Amino acid sequence: MGGGGSQTKNIVARLVAFCFNENVKTAQSMTGEGLQAVGANIRALRRRSHLSQGEFAQRLGMRQGPVCNIELGKNLPSAQVLLRMADVLRVTTDQILRPAGSPSPTERIHENMNERVLVPVIRHPGGPANPLVDTDSGTASGLSAVGVVARDYLALEDLCRVPRQARIPLQLGFDLTTDSLERLARQVRALCGVGQAVVFDHFELFENHGLRVVLMPLGNAVPGLAYYDAANCNVFIVIDDAQNPERQIFTLVYSLGRILIYNRVGLVKETAPAREARDDKAARRFAAAFLMPEESVRTSVGQTGVRPDEWDFPLLLRLKHRFGVSAQAFNYRLLELGLIAPARQTEFRAVIGEHYEASDFTEPGESRRILSPNGRLGDLLHTALARGDAEAREIAERFRELKIRLP
């Protein structure tokens, strides 16, 4: 038995050596175009591993310059370097020396996301990352585009040499009771440095703390998607830009809530439907508490001098605009805090419902929230383009094709 096992190991070792030698022979016969394809593939594999070029070089025991030349297709990695690359990137040498004509970023989206480059918080991490991909072609196209943008975002961070980590912790201890979620909202606001203050641009607030937020067309398939980047303890929050500003803001904060719930300590084992319903409800509670902090709402209402039975609809619209939320959400929050008479709240709820039905869910009133979406993404692209980077020009063209609006 022992001799048979040893013989099998020797056969496997010889097969591996043969395959590796064949890969090296193939690589040695490559043209300049083939070298560039290999270099681009190494760069893509490195970014999928969430490594900067400097970190990659350090793990290989090399200087960054030679690694840069390999990725640019100027040189081919030696056999020893190729083996070290395969080990660091956790791939085979065959995957590194992929022939020219590799699939486009869009065609590789499902492969990349299923390898957990990004973990979707809307599904168990063991499940497929793209649960809606088989529903219709429009949804599949939108979700594929998300993967392209996520990789381009990582590429821009790499090109601009900026930190990839979020500046706030995304693993916090809490339970899913109402009081605990209210405390969580206060804690996250404190970590963001805003306390109980009214926030006028939530996108800028999140981006200033290193969170990756992208507004782009999703074809009305979903209001937004939230992916957790475990390697960097960061996120990708992608929001459909066809929504009104209030829905965009809610989707942003709701998505952060889902990520915090996904990461929380002491998860309770439940069936998937029960867990989804529980997490959705908890994330909505977190979003309401974050967007409409009790102290801020009470202060704003107190400054008007209005009593619970004196509210009129124009005043409700004036105050809800200050918090960047829907009329429906603010009306409910007032009732929850005992700041509006139940009869008046019921009256407003009927008025709001009629307006939504007649206007395809646009917000009542003339005031519109002014937001500055994709600010950090635009800044990174501007910096990379200013340095004359060829890859940045390719990224800019893809963003134009995907109709991503940049400031």
Image: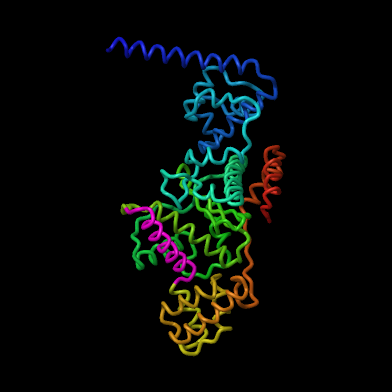
Q: How many numbered marks are there?
A: 0
Taking the magenta stretch, the answer to whether it contains residue 280 is yes
For image coordinates 66% across by 52% down, the residue present is 404
Give coordinates of residue 77: x percent, y percent.
58, 21
Give coordinates of residue 207: x percent, y percent.
56, 55
Q: Is residue 207 above or below residue 180?
A: above
| Camera-nearest residue between 122 and 133 | 133
| Camera-nearest residue between 216 and 133 | 133
Residue 243, located in which quarter of the rendered image?
bottom right
Q: In the visual, does 267 lie left or right of 203? A: left
Q: Is residue 116 above or below residue 251?
A: above
For image coordinates 47% across by 76% down, the residue present is 297
Residue 342, located in which quarter of the rendered image?
bottom left
Q: Which residues are magenta?
A: 270-293
Q: Which residue, as the protein is rendered here, is positioned at the far left? A: 1
Give coordinates of residue 391: x percent, y percent.
67, 38
Q: Is residue 359 above or below residue 406?
A: below
